[in-house]
């Protein structure tokens, strides 16, 4: 079934129909190698539709969920050491979902889950610049050392981007990062002389953990999923 190209693009979730029409008029969309400059053009799923040189895939029924990860669980399907994993906590109907990034064994809070592996990868790529916000309780009181983390720091040859850090109390910090390297917050704060005692993620992009109970999972609405997809481009 053929549909207007602007609707096809909007249905893919990457742009609204109005913005898609603007991009078409600007010559940034092609169909089967030919630049299209009018939204009055019909396409179907067999056509190769490109936006700024990247192929637009017809959207399937993408589902994304927000899961409140408990402490002492591994973000993996199987742990060689026999530790409990998130899949031991999740109900059976969710055990085919992919996790978006990882939270370490002791870190709690928001973990996104999806049925779309490609989206899971896109949402974790460093160039997506998606913000992740955490609440960290630290050991130590010399908070002036946080300036190193705020300006960006290199540790053992690895560069860490600047962190946005808000001091909530003398031992509690609200931290926002956009890269998500392995154990990033724990490593950086330890290098600043403020090792992490507890770490809890409260937001991933536009998604908030809100009042989701520990160990529970909820499905996100289509509007929020669209925002996530757009933020990963």
Image: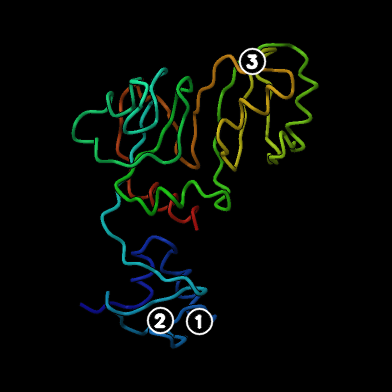
Q: Are marks 1 and 3 in contact (CB under 8 Å)?
A: no
The residue nearer to you, when weighing 44 against 184, is: 184
Q: Tell me the tag on residue 25.
A: 1
Identify the residue at horizontal 49%, vertical 38% (top origin).
204
Identify the residue at horizontal 45%, vertical 69% (top origin).
18
**In the displayed structure, does residue 202 sit left or right of residue 88?**
right
For residue 216, which quarter of the picture?
top left
Mark 2 element type? loop
Mark 3, Cα crowd under 10 Å, few <14 / some 14-19 / many 20+, is many
Q: CA distance from mark 1 to mark 3?
A: 53 Å
Q: Are marks 2 and 1 in contact (CB under 8 Å)?
A: yes
Query: Which residue was labeled with disc 2?
Result: 39
- List x then y, in percent, for residue 167: 69, 21
The residue nearer to you, when weighing 139 against 229, is: 139
Mark 3 element type? strand
Labels 2 and 3: the sequence-earlier one: 2
Q: Nearer the viewer, mark 2 or mark 3?
A: 3
Identify the residue at horizontal 32%, vertical 33% (top origin).
77
- Residue closest to the far bottom: 34
Q: Quadrant of the N terminus?
A: bottom left
The residue nearer to you, when weighing 213 against 87, is: 87
Mark 2, Cα crowd under 10 Å, few <14 / some 14-19 / many 20+, is some
Q: Nearer the viewer, mark 1 or mark 3?
A: 3
Q: Tell me the tag on residue 42.
A: none
Labels 2 and 1: the sequence-earlier one: 1
- List x then y, in percent, for residue 217: 30, 30
Mark 1 element type? helix
Query: Which residue was labeled with disc 3?
Result: 138
**In the displayed structure, does residue 38 sit left or right of residue 153?**
left
Q: Would you place residue 222 above or below residue 76 in this image?
A: below
């Amino acid at each position: 079934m053929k549909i207007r190209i602007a609707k096809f693009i909007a249905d893919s979730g990457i742009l609204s129909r109005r913005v898609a029409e603007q991009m078409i008029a600007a010559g940034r969309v092609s169909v089967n190698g030919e630049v299209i400059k009018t939204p009055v053009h019909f396409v179907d799923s067999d056509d190769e539709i490109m936006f700024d040189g990247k192929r637009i895939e017809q959207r399937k029924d993408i589902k994304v969920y927000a899961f409140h990860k408990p402490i002492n669980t591994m973000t993996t399907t199987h742990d060689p050491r026999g530790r409990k994993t998130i899949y031991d906590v999740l109900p059976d109907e969710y055990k085919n979902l992919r996790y978006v990034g990882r939270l370490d064994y002791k870190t709690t809070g928001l973990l996104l889950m999806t049925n779309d592996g490609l989206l899971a990868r896109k949402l974790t790529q460093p160039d997506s610049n998606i913000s992740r916000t955490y609440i960290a309780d630290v050991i130590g009181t010399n908070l002036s050392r946080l300036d190193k983390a705020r300006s960006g720091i290199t540790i053992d040859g690895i560069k860490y981007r600047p962190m946005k850090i808000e001091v909530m109390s003398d031992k509690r910090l609200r931290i926002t990062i956009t890269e998500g390297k392995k154990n990033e917050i724990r490593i950086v704060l330890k290098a600043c002389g403020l090792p992490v005692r507890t770490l809890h993620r409260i937001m991933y992009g536009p998604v908030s953990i809100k009042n989701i109970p520990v160990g529970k999972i909820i499905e996100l609405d289509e509007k929020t999923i669209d925002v996530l997809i757009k933020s990963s481009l």
